[in-house]
Amino acid sequence: MKYAFIQLHRSTWPISVQCRVLGVSIAGYHEHFVRLASPAHRRHLSDDALLVHIKAIHAQTRGGYGWPRTWKELLGRGIRVGKERVQKLMQLHGIRAKGKRRFKVTTDSNHDLPISANLLNREFDVAAPDRVWVGDITYIATDEGWLFLAVVIDLFSRQVVGWSLREEMTRDIVIDALRMAWFKRHPGTHAGLMFHSDRGSQYASKDFREELKEYNITSSMSRRGNCWDNACSETLFGSLKVDRLYGQKFKTRREAKDETIAWLLWYKGTRLHSTLAYVSPMKFEQNWLANQPKQANS
C-alpha cells in the first residue's frame, strides 16, 4: 500500500521524499512497478491494483480524463484491460472527468474593417500539416486583472503551434501568435496556407492582414455570431479552462501564464485527443511524418 500511495501522489511530492518519509527504498519502489508492468502480472491485475493506476492517471491529468481516455492511457502504458472494466471501476469509485462548462469568448466584431469570406466552411479534417491554421482569443481572470491568450492551431493535428499571452487584447497579441507559428513551423510562402479566425477587430486589422499577406497566407473568417465555424478553438479553450484553470485563483498574471503555458505544452505532447485516435497532437503528426516515405513508395 505504501508503493501505491507513492505512485498516486508522485505528481505532488518527489518520489525520493515520499520513500524517505514512508521508510521504503527507492529501488524497492521501482522494482515493485516493474513487476506490475510484467506481462504475467498484467494478465491477473486485481481491481485494487488497477484502481491504483486509474487514480494515478486521474491525479496526473488533474481530473481531465473520463473513462475512454483513461482506458487508452492504460493501454499506452502497457496495461491490457477491457474498457468495460475501466468504466465500471471508475463509476463504482466516483472517478470522473471534470464537467464541461460554458465559457464566454470575447469577440469584437462591431467594426467597419474588411471581413474575409468563410473559406474553411467547417471543413475541419485536413490532409496534411500547415494547410489550415485556426486562430482565436480567450481570457483568464487574475487578481491583477485579465490575462488574454491568443493561439494558432494547426487543424491537421490540433497542435497549438503558436501562442501569445498579454495584458491587453490588441492586434499585437494575434500578430505575436502568428509570428511564433510561422518561425516555428517554416511552412514557406508557396504552401497555400489558410488562416481561419472569427471576425474580431484584431484579425480584421490592417496590421494583421498585412502580416498574412507578407506570409502569403489566405484569410478566412467565421460567419457573424456563429461560434461553430471556429469549433476547434472553442474546444481547445474549453479543455484548458476545465482541465486546468477552473477553480483556481491566480494572484498574479505571472502565475496564470506559467499554468497556461504548462498546460499548452502538456496538451501538445501528452494529452490524448479523441479526434486523433487517442494519441497526442505531437504523436499524431510524428506518426504521419513517419509514414510519408512508405506512402511515397507505395
Image: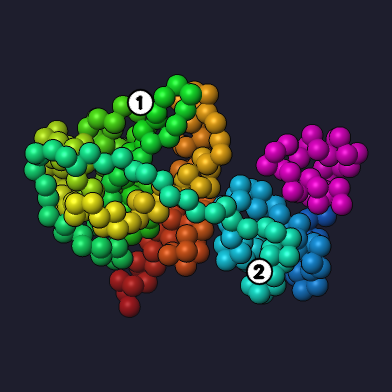
Q: Amino acid at mark 2?
A: Gln
Residue at x-position 40% and y-position 54%? 235
Q: Label 1 to label 2, Cα distance in Å?
A: 42 Å
Is 274 in the magenta? Answer: no
Q: Earlier in the sequence, mark 1 or mark 2?
A: 2
Q: Amino acid at mark 1?
A: Glu
Q: Quadrant of residue 149?
A: top left
SS for callout 1: loop
Q: Are marks 1 and 2 in contact (CB under 8 Å)?
A: no
Left or right: 140 in relation to 153: right
Report x, y in % for residue 276.
Answer: 43, 64
Residue tagged 2:
87
Q: Which residues are magenta?
A: 1-30
Residue 134 in view here? yes
Residue tagged 1:
167
Residue at x-position 57% and y-position 52%? 98
Report x, y in % for residue 102.
Answer: 43, 50
Q: Residue furthest right?
A: 23
Left or right: 70 in relation to 17: left
**Which label is found at residue 251?**
none
Residue 292 drawn above or below residue 28: below
Between 80 and 60, the residue placed more toward the observer is 60
Residue 102 drawn above or below residue 74: above
Between 206 and 28, the residue placed more toward the observer is 206
Q: Quadrant of residue 126?
A: bottom left
Residue at x-position 56% and y-position 39%? 247
Report x, y in % for residue 204.
Answer: 15, 40
